[in-house]
Image (tube, helix red, strand yellow):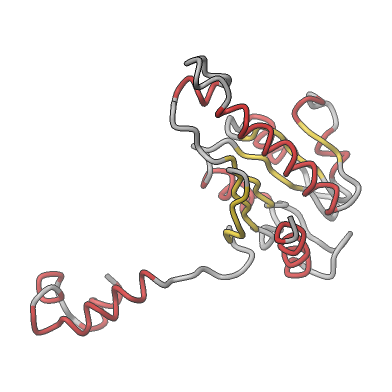
Amino acid sequence: MAVLSILNLSLDELFSNSNQAIYQKIAHGLATFVGLPHRIQFIRELNRVRYYDDNYSSAFPAADVAIKAFEDYPTILIAGGKDRHLDLTAMKERFFSAKNLKKIILIGETRFMLAEGEDPDKFILADSLEDAVEYAKNYAEKYAADLESNYDLCIPSTREALNNQTAKPVIVLMSPGAASFDMFKDFSDRGNQFQQIVNAF
């Protein structure tokens, strides 16, 4: 629509025979569009688990957007980072109340503050990014297997399976909601390291 506005064309005019070249260019642009790196960037799918890099997320509002993007999918979140002495109350409430978050892997200086007073079944504390991704992978693959288990017996094994017999992929989302400087050079370094670990599986 933005291109049509710039070209001063209506939708009807775009689909006319005289504008087929413009239509083809717009269609090609939409089909090949790739977002910026580290912004809810799809990395790969392995064993019914999809991995997404949202390491540009250096503040809670960005992490909240990423959580909402996957609200219909069972999600394992990797979050936490540099302690900037901010009030983490809203972040904690969101992390531990979001229905799609099945496990939260906490890293960085904020991990203990985010975990304080929360149900220990809902989170894992990780000392390194490597450990965090390994925990997320193992938990997500087990969750994905549980979604598919017992289908032959027609006994859904999880709440998602009860609601939807077509098992959805499980999401591993790294959206820290915090700065990276406690463990990494910057958000790009954090995201690149995350991608390297995931691609090495």
Position of the N terminus, as image quadrant, is: bottom left
Residue sitting at the far right: 127
- 50 sits to left or right of 107: left
Count of number-bearing discs = 0
Residue sitting at the far front: 152
The relative height of residue 123 versus residue 3 in the rendered view (above or below) is above
- 199 sits to left or right of 100: right
Position of the C terminus, as image quadrant, is: bottom right
- From the top left corner, tell me how far across and down residue 161 is, in percent: 50, 24
| Residue 23 occupies quadrant | bottom left
The relative height of residue 41 versus residue 75 in the rendered view (above or below) is below
Q: Who's the residue at 64% across and 57% down the image?
A: 54
- From the top left corner, tell me how far across and down residue 145 is, in percent: 62, 32
| Residue 144 occupies quadrant | top right
- From the top left corner, tell me how far across and down residue 164 is, in percent: 44, 27
The relative height of residue 52 versus residue 73 in the rendered view (above or below) is below
Please tell me which residue lies in front, 192 or 166. 166
- From the top left corner, tell me how far across and down residue 110 is, in percent: 85, 46
Q: Who's the residue at 63% across and 35% down the image?
A: 101
- 117 sits to left or right of 31: right
- 90 sits to left or right of 40: right
Q: Who's the residue at 75% across and 28% down the image?
A: 122
Q: Who's the residue at 37% across and 69% down the image?
A: 31
